[in-house]
Image (cartoon, helix red, strand yellow):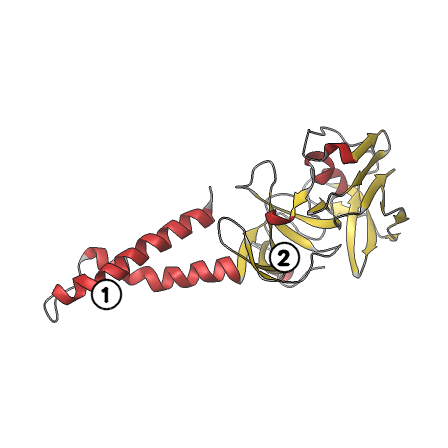
Amino acid sequence: MNFALILFLVTLATGILWLIDVLYARKLRAPGAKNPIWVEWGASLFPVILAVFALRSFVVEPFKIPSGSMIPTLQVGDYILVNKFTYGLRLPIIGTEIVGGKAVARGDVVVFRYPPEPNVDYIKRVIGLPGDTVSYQSKQLSINGVPVPRKAETDYLHTDRMYASQMYRETLGEVTYDTLNDGDAPAFVPDVVRFPYRDQCRYDNTGFVCKVPEGNYFVMGDNRDNSKDSRVWGFVPDANIVGKAFFIWFHWGDLGRIGSFR
């Protein structure tokens, strides 16, 4: 379901009703007469719906985390806020940039339209920028031939399934965050599909090496062995970027998760 499109259509419809009422129908009603239903439930709601549409389109948008691909940074059921203007303002629905912003940086956690299904939103961490060579071999991440620094931490216990993953503190540029690896998971990438610029990637039994095309990004989940990401379905075009995730605003059953995250 394309909620942004639905909200736009509702805003448009109530806006038309509001204009009809202001420019024509209101003048025909007797003083003190009760507003008709189409005014009460249509035209009168337009300012509120317009404010919601503008806020969601240009300022901040809420999302719910549906999967465990970003554990431990984000948990299933986290409600997060996404800054819509960090990387510049884009027109709703079509995504055309109208005002420039900051450049996407390595380590940013971003929401984007999933390239194979643009009506679906995904969230991952940006690993490679346009022109970068990203490799993940024997579960060691490298950018442009330089291994990304990481330090082993205490194993992470998955309480829902009662097993532990190896946790590492990884530093990418100016961002430090935790990642998970499962010792019994293979290093090679399974289920790789054909995707645009697939010829820029090389896969073997130790992992992969990819050259990021211009105008695209390479993204990965922090839960490295439980995330289908750019390793599997390819690069994220710049036009697909929705915004930068920056705040956990709610989590049912665990209010301690409310707050910002790395």
Q: Earlier in the sequence, mark 1 or mark 2?
A: 1
Image quadrant where residue 39 sits: bottom left
* Residue occupying the far left of the picture: 30
- Mark 2 lies on residue: 245
Q: Nearer the viewer, residue 234 or 147?
A: 234
Regarding residue 250, the answer to whether it shows in the image is no
> How many residues crowd around disc 1 within 10 Å: few (fewer than 14), some, or many (20 or more)?
few
Give the total of numbered labels.
2
Task: State the residue in front, 257 or 148.
Answer: 148
Mark 1 or 2, which is nearer the eye?
Answer: 1
Secondary structure of the residue carrying tag 1 is helix
Q: Residue furthest right?
A: 146
* Residue pictured at 80% horizontal, 61% vertical: 174
Real-space Cα separation, disc 1 to disc 2, in angstroms: 40 Å
Disc 2 marks a residue whose amino acid type is Ala
- The residue that label 1 is drawn on is 22
Q: Where residue 7 sits in the image (x, y, percent)?
A: 41, 51
Q: Is residue 237 left or right of residue 35?
A: right
Amino acid on which disc 1 is placed: Val
Which percent across, then down, holds residue 1? 46, 41
Using a 10 Å C-alpha cutoff, classify the residue at mark 2 as few (fewer than 14 neighbours), some (14 to 19) or many (20 or more).
many
